[in-house]
Amino acid sequence: MTTQANRELIRHFWQASEHGNIAEMVALWAPDAINHGGQTAQAQRRPPAGIKGLKRVFSSLLTAFPDRKYLIEDLIASEDKVVCCLTVSGTHQGTPEIPVEGGMLMTIPATGKAYTVQQIHIFRVENNKIAEHWAVRDDLGMMQQLGVVPIPG
């Protein structure tokens, strides 16, 4: 795949995500894809593996934030990697089934509050599919905006 085709694959993923189309989202991933998730180091908070795990992650994100929007600020491709800088926004309307966004929302009932944060996602593409994913998210900023974690000062 060309770097442009890799960029378009990732753009397509975010569009499908914004529309809540889980079947389309999952179809863009390799069957043995690895979702490293975010910066959480605790093994019990890592995303579940495989396509079945991805479906659970995507479903939980949609449960928590059904109106979630992804504004692509930058999309950089080099060989098999694509780096995507995003502004992500949404309203906390449900409690996820599994640990997503660092696992901090697992027991938190919907706050009805909105948030906007920056995220960086790195994808590795292989055979026209997403093979690996890493993320750097502002989970603390999101939790503060949702009123779950106090803002210092």
Image (spheres, rainbow, N blue to C red):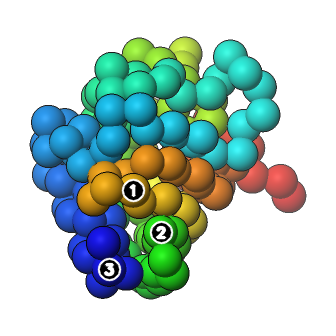
How far across and how far down the image is residue 86, in percent?
45, 70
User: Which residue does the image show at 37% across and 81% down from the upper left?
Assistant: 3
**Of the pair 97 and 75, the residue shown nearer to us:** 75
User: In this picture, is 121 found above or below 75?
Assistant: above
How far across and how far down the image is residue 113, in percent?
42, 45
Q: Is residue 113 left or right of residue 6?
A: right
In the rendered structure, are the residues bearing label 1 and label 3 in contact, judged by CB atoms less than 8 Å apart?
Answer: no
Tag 3: Cα neighbours inside 10 Å, few (<14), some, or many (≥20)? few
Separation (CA) of disc 1 from disc 3? 11 Å
Q: Which residue corresponds to mark 2?
A: 80
Q: Is residue 140 left or right of residue 76?
A: right
Q: Between disc 3 and disc 2, whose residue precedes?
A: 3
Disc number at residue 126? 1
* Total marks placed: 3
In the rendered structure, are the residues bearing label 3 and label 2 in contact, judged by CB atoms less than 8 Å apart?
Answer: no
Q: Between disc 2 and disc 1, whose residue precedes?
A: 2
Q: Is residue 1 left or right of residue 20?
A: right
Q: Quadrant of residue 50?
A: top left
In the rendered structure, are the residues bearing label 2 and label 1 in contact, judged by CB atoms less than 8 Å apart?
Answer: yes
**Of the pair 123 and 90, the residue shown nearer to us:** 123
Q: Which residue corresponds to mark 3?
A: 2
User: In this picture, is 110 found above or below 75?
Assistant: above
Say which element carries label 1.
Answer: strand
Q: Check disc 3 and give the amino acid type.
A: Thr
The answer to whether residue 152 is seen in the rendering is yes
Disc number at residue 118? none
Q: Quadrant of residue 153?
A: bottom right
Separation (CA) of disc 3 from disc 2? 8 Å
Q: Quadrant of residue 89?
A: bottom left
**Of the pair 80 and 123, the residue shown nearer to us:** 80
Tag 2: Cα neighbours inside 10 Å, few (<14), some, or many (≥20)? some
Q: Check disc 2 and give the amino acid type.
A: Asp
